Amino acid sequence: MLWVVAPGREAPGFAASGGCFDRPGDRLAQQPRGGGRRMGGKLIVVVGPMYAGKTAWLIDYAAGKDFRAFLPEIAVRGLRSRDGRELPATRLPVDIAGNVELGEASVYLFDEVQFFGKGFVELVLELLRSGKDVVAAGLDLDWQGRPFETTASLLALADVVVKLTARCAVCGAPARFSWKVSADGHRIDPAAHYEPRCRHHYPPLRGS
């Protein structure tokens, strides 16, 4: 597995073992070293807090590719980055079960994957078994620092993991966490207001 730790949209290029990726996918799309033939598809999982540029990363990766894009039906905004760019995307039920017709493509992009249920992981595995590449983006942790089950399962299966950071809303340092500013205690609330926080300014790690 290749791990890439990268800043958000402020620095679209990032360093990794084997060289520097000038754009998402420059090296990620290469065949395995040694000339071996790749069997099955490749799973790339992009995670990070709110405002880290996960959707923008997906949009950059899609450039020039034969793709289909999807997001959960409860997502508030479409597959649209905070800098205003957008991809056409189909909404899928949160509780995916059985066969789902996704259309034909070489690459399948999924945003806000933390909202999907257990059936989504099996859907991803089926795409990989059929030789399709999958890129899944979403939150890895909820606002209380607990892993989202679907995202955690995808991370365990990933060929490549890209961990993005945002800027802490308090001090501007690299932020790995999302803090829920509203008083609502629900774990998943697409309409709530969140802030990116660094480790020092993330209340669950400070005991407050």
Image (cartoon, grey):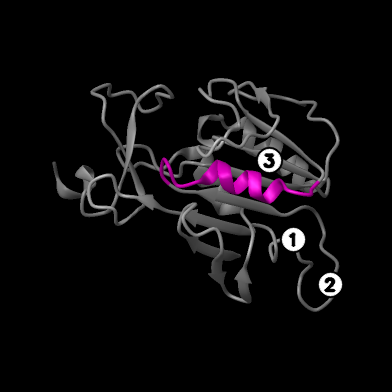
- Discs 1, 3 touching: Cβ within 8 Å: no
Residue at 83 percent across and 30 percent down: it is 103
Label 2, label 1: how many angstroms apart (C-alpha)? 14 Å
Binning the other alpha carbons within 10 Å of mark 2 as few (below 14), some (14 to 19) or many (20 upward) gives: few
Whether the magenta-drawn stretch holds residue 62 is answered as yes
Q: Give the residue type at disc 2.
A: Gly
What span is colored magenta in the figure? Answer: 49-65
Q: Earlier in the sequence, mark 1 or mark 3?
A: 1
Q: Give the residue type at disc 3.
A: Leu
Label 3, label 2: how many angstroms apart (C-alpha)? 25 Å
Looking at the rendering, in which quadrant would you find the C terminus? Answer: top left
Residue at 59 percent across and 21 percent down: it is 73
- The residue that label 3 is drawn on is 109
Q: Is residue 65 left or right of residue 140?
A: right
- The residue that label 1 is drawn on is 29
Residue at 67 percent across and 31 percent down: it is 70
- The residue that label 2 is drawn on is 36
